[in-house]
Image: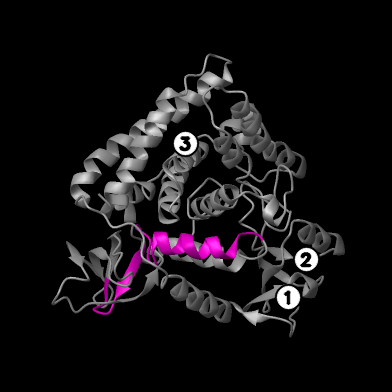
């Protein structure tokens, strides 16, 4: 049986199935196996881990625990409550219409961020004007219909993670900042900060940055320096605002001080640093990478709730969930009829009733004619039972998002 145990109850002889520390980006440390030494427990504790998951059938058990199922039920309840907050943005342009523009902006964004990083790497003159214009175009697309860029954010290739992550993070920050009512200038600066938050990785050695296996402790320390490098490069770049520097510099800081580069705690981290930290963790844990199988969007939201309070700002986490929805775009859901569908458009009036694209019937275990269904449309009887993992049905959701 899989159980969650506090770090204080972790003992030599227990079998860890999950270190529960994916809030630490780039952490490729082995995450499962029997604990053989007390030093291992201390090392896990120093990382800021409060709870780990163990398999009681493969090692020692403890009474000081709760089952993974109990944790999931609590997280699901918290997720539903977070979804009851005030609605977010209401689209005023049809999804199909905005998707044409969003595809152009998304493609342009990846190319421009890549070009910007290449110029910075060779020490060339950096023109920030195109980045500012791109930030405005991203913001305008989100305002027209946020679902378009959200769809594209789920269509990603793990070999192009660095650029796609930067663009997706800027989209998430645009959504988040709009929901929270940030002023136009503040929002613009945070979007630029999100676009360029990983700029410092140009100074990370390629053998570490692109290493397919686990990083050593020494390599991980080198990787962590990128946040400081991003701050320093942006701080000396003409045309970059103070909030852009702060957003990029603080995207790996954590409330309990276990983050980096400065180990800031609580209110020492700016509002924008706490926002981008949540957005960054969510995008990272829901993405497929060489060393990491991404969680489903709903699983990702539940993990944010589980890590809030100690590592992530709990109030902001709930607001972030509300602006993405109970079933974020790209989620696969099981309907009462037995059909599977991918969420392609949120419903800001009732998060339980998004627009879904169905393609498979679980009762007959076979593909069905692809159809797009607005669950909020009068006369539609089907409802969502729960979110599911598309891998369980060997379905690639990316094929149904355009």
Which residue lies at the image location 51% right of the left edge and 52% below the top edge? 279
Relative depth, front residue between 395 and 264 = 264
Q: Which residue is mark 2?
A: 35
Indicate left or right for 119 with 307 as reference. Answer: left
Q: Position of residue 145 (x, y in %)?
A: 27, 50
Which residue lies at the image location 70% right of the left edge and 64% below the top edge? 33
Which residue lies at the image location 73% right of the left edge and 73% below the top edge? 6
Point out the image quarter for the N terminus.
bottom right
Secondary element under disc 3, as helix, strand or loop, is helix
Does the residue at mark 2 contact the one at mark 1 (Cβ under 8 Å)? yes
Relative depth, front residue between 391 and 156 = 156
Q: Residues within 10 Å of mark 3 (few under 14, many from 20)?
A: many
Indicate left or right for 148 with 209 as reference. Answer: left
Which circle's residue, 2 or 3, is located before the other in the chain?
Answer: 2
Q: Which mark is residue 163?
A: 3
Q: Position of residue 365 (x, y in %)?
A: 27, 72
Residue 314 shown in magenta? yes
Q: Which residue is mark 1?
A: 59
């Amino acid at each position: 049986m899989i159980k969650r145990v506090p770090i204080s109850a972790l003992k030599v002889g227990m079998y860890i199935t999950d270190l529960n520390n994916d809030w630490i980006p780039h952490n490729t440390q082995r995450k499962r196996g029997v604990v053989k030494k007390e030093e291992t427990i201390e090392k896990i504790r120093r990382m800021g881990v409060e709870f780990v998951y163990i398999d009681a059938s493969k090692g020692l058990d403890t009474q000081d625990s709760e089952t993974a199922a109990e944790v999931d039920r609590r997280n699901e309840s918290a997720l539903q409550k977070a979804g009851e907050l005030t609605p977010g943005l209401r689209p005023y342009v049809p999804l199909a219409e905005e998707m044409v523009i969003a595809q152009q902006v998304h493609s342009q964004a990846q190319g421009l961020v890549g070009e910007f990083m290449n110029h910075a790497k060779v020490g060339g003159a950096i023109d920030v004007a195109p980045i500012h214009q791109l930030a405005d175009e991203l913001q305008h697309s989100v305002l027209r219909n946020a679902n378009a860029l959200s769809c594209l954010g789920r269509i990603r290739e793990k070999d192009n993670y660095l650029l796609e992550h930067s663009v997706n993070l800027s989209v998430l920050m645009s959504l988040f900042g709009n929901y929270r009512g940030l002023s136009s200038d503040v929002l613009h600066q945070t979007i630029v900060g999100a676009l360029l938050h990983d700029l410092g990785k140009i100074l990370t050695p390629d053998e570490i940055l692109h290493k397919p296996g686990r990083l050593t402790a020494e390599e991980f320390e080198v990787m962590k320096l990128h946040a400081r490098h991003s701050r320093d490069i942006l701080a000396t770049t003409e045309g970059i605002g103070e909030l852009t520097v702060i957003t990029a510099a603080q995207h790996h800081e954590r409330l309990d001080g276990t983050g980096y580069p400065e180990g800031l705690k609580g209110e020492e981290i700016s509002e924008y640093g706490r926002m981008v930290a949540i957005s960054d963790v969510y995008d990272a844990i829901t993405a497929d990478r060489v060393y990491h199988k991404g969680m489903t969007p709903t699983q990702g939201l539940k993990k944010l709730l589980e890590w809030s309070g100690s590592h992530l700002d709990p109030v902001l986490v709930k607001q972030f969930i509300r602006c993405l929805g109970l079933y974020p775009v790209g989620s696969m859901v099981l309907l009462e009829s037995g059909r599977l569908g991918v969420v392609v458009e949120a419903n800001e009036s009732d998060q339980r009733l998004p627009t879904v694209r169905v393609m498979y019937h679980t009762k007959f275990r076979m593909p069905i004619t692809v159809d797009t269904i607005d669950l909020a449309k009068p006369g539609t009887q089907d409802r969502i039972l729960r979110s599911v993992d598309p891998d369980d049905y060997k379905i690639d959701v990316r094929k149904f998002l355009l």
